[in-house]
Image: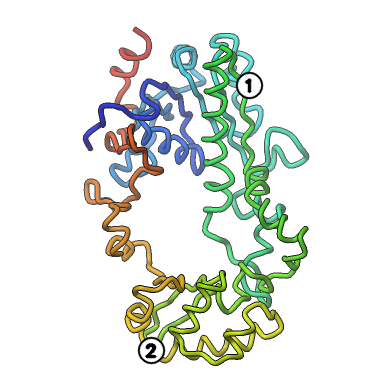
Amino acid sequence: MKKPAQMPLQGIKVVEFAGIGPVPFCGMLLADMGADVVRIDRPGTPDTGSADIQGRGKRSISLDLKQPEDKKTAIMLMAKADLLMEGFRPGVMERLALGPEMALAQNPALVYGRMTGWGQDGPLAQRAGHDINYIAITGALNAMGSADSPPPPPLNLLGDYGGGALYLAMGLLAGLIHARASGQGQVIDAAIVDGTLSLMAPIHWLRASGMWQNNRNSNLLDGAAHFYSSYICQDGRYLAVGAIEPQFYAELCDGLCVGETIRNNQYDQAKWPVFKAELAGIFASKPLKYWLDVFANSDACVAPIEDMVCALDNEHLRARKSLMQVDGILQPAPAPRFSKTPGAITGPPPVPGGNRKDILRDWLN
């Protein structure tokens, strides 16, 4: 875990109020890029050791925000920060007297990031919720899965992390650029419902263009197309096929040795169920390795479906060192990659409250 000489966010100070889901993940992204992320933990927070992947590269201080001295320390840290992120329900930080109005009065250039599911206002703002609820009302969840069963949860990647943490990170960094140019900070209202809807923009475009039906499992990208789907092989392993463009589709057809009817009617949606059944039978006739050999040097857009542990042994991911073992914990490498100022895992997850002395020395002296 050697720290590069220069990192993209080197010198940026971040206060992260400990929470779950999007906020710690966003903090990890910033820490991977070299930001000095100080996590404010509650006293008594258990130490989960190296398993706390989202804590990597951060430092921790334990503060009881209901106690005057600890609150004063939090305010002093906020006054020195470039970025702040919290994931409480609307109004919680105000009740603690740590809200944006106070923070920006103390530190006018602070970018104050607020991460919630429903947003800072609206009828549901004070309601509890989780990823599946947020993506449900946006139309995203309804677009996934088979037509004859309830939509399956896409883990919590789409809402919490895609529509939440990544939009929080983008908002914080955009706010930082503005603050550096103007000297004025601002509040970032990062709502998972808003971010998820933003991610759905391409699907809304397809629908507006007449290329998307508002019915699950009947479209190009939702598993209906025989050339964009997953298949089971003879040995029970799975294969992903994404041969959308005609030239890639032609290579898929060559590898499968299919007849002219399938070759010449790629986009005849009425025939998709029949074609899909035929391809399912072909793929099921041979083990996964056979098909990987067939398509080894092909642009047919065929790939094995790895589990998250076996992905470590994937030839491409291994060559790029996209996954790594740190203290015996398998975890993704920092992303994206920079040609001049690379990101890095700069340290293990902190012991909750274990960096108090160093943080106060580095930030407040």
State the image quarter where residue 340 is shown.
top left
Query: Mark 2 and mark 1: span between their CA atoms?
Result: 62 Å
In the rendered structure, which disc, 2 or 1, sits on the residue that comes first in sequence?
A: 1
Q: In this orientation, which residue lies closer to the viewer: 359 or 143?
A: 143
The label on residue 31 is none
Q: In this orientation, which residue lies closer to the viewer: 189 or 361?
A: 189
In the rendered view, tell whether residue 131 sits above or below residue 49: below
For badge 2, the amino acid type reads: Lys
For badge 1, the amino acid type reads: Glu
Q: Position of residue 188 (x, y in %)?
A: 61, 28
> Are there few (<14), some (14-19), or many (20+) residues within 10 Å of tag 1?
few
Question: On the picture, is 296 further left or further right than 98?
Answer: left
Question: Which residue: 51% across, 41% down?
Answer: 22
Q: In this orientation, which residue lies closer to the viewer: 100 or 319?
A: 319
Secondary structure of the residue carrying numbered label 1: helix
Q: In this orientation, which residue lies closer to the viewer: 83 or 184?
A: 184
Label 1 sits on residue: 94
Tag 2 near tag 1, CB within 8 Å: no
Question: Which residue: 65% across, 60% down?
Answer: 141
Q: Position of residue 237 (x, y in %)?
A: 39, 79
Label 2 sits on residue: 286
